[in-house]
Amino acid sequence: MLNHPEITQSTLAGLRSLDNLNWSLVVFLAFVLYVYMTAVEEKRWNQISAGLALYGVHWFVEIVNALIQHFSGHALWTASGGSAFIILIGVGIEISFMFSVAGLILSKLLPEDRSLKILGINNRIIFAVVNALLISLIEIPLAASPIFHWVYPWWGALTVWIFVYIPFFLAAFLCHDARPKSRRIFLGSLYALNVLMLMIFIPLGWI
């Protein structure tokens, strides 16, 4: 049995609607621009790469979730209300703004020594797993609220942690340490794929 199956249709009804737009989005955008412009000013390209990597994986995952909704009738999660603009069925613009800077901000916590081990495990992996766990725990009260829902009973904090947030932070922190050429290849390929999927699937009405 699904959790709140009626939510899917109500979320789809508000998908990319302009009815709820408000001025708070200008503040969020200014915050994102400030974070990135400060990093550019300080030439912290590794942190910028971490931010862009996490955000690119975020978009890929949200597109996949929207495709799951199209082909199965229900997404794994829905941004069911309270957003000024629902971009895809599982994400509102506010949370997307947050993810746009999450990788950059949290990469500031990484030890300078990329080879340092914690409990015998590379620190990048440890930081990715721990950050992913914290974010997945934040989803628990969100999923209990009217603004966000886990649709399937088997989808929850554990699955989000493993299949969504660990890949987010692994991509961010590994890209943070990668060579410039490798970063460009990874980010260019990831964003090209996302843009291609959006250009194909939105006109088809799939997402």
Image (cartoon, grey):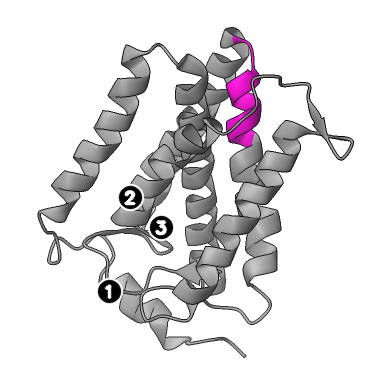
Question: Which residue position is annotated with label 1?
Answer: 13
Q: Nearer the viewer, residue 122 or 96?
A: 122
Q: CA distance from mark 1 to mark 3?
A: 13 Å
Residue farthest along the right direction in this orientation: 120
Name the residue located 41 percent from the left edge and 78 percent from the top edge: 8
Q: Which mark is residue 207?
A: 3
Q: Nearer the viewer, residue 196 or 50?
A: 50
Are dots 2 and 1 in contact, CB under 8 Å? Answer: no
In magenta segment, residue 174: yes
Q: Which mark is residue 136?
A: none
User: Around disc 2, counting alpha carbons within 10 Å, would you say few (fewer than 14), some (14 to 19), or many (20 or more)?
Assistant: few
Which secondary structure lies at badge 3? loop
Which residues, given as a range, are shown in magenta? 171-179
In magenta segment, residue 90: no
Residue farthest along the bottom direction in this orientation: 1
Instruction: Tell me the amino acid under the disc marked 2.
Output: Pro
Residue 173, image quadrant:
top right
Sooner in the amino-acid sequence: mark 2 or mark 1: 1
Residue 92, image quadrant:
bottom left
Q: Position of residue 97 (x, y in %)?
A: 33, 46
Give the foreground label among 2 and 1: 1
Q: Nearer the viewer, residue 62 or 26?
A: 26
Instruction: Tell me the amino acid under the disc marked 1.
Output: Ala
Which secondary structure lies at badge 1? helix
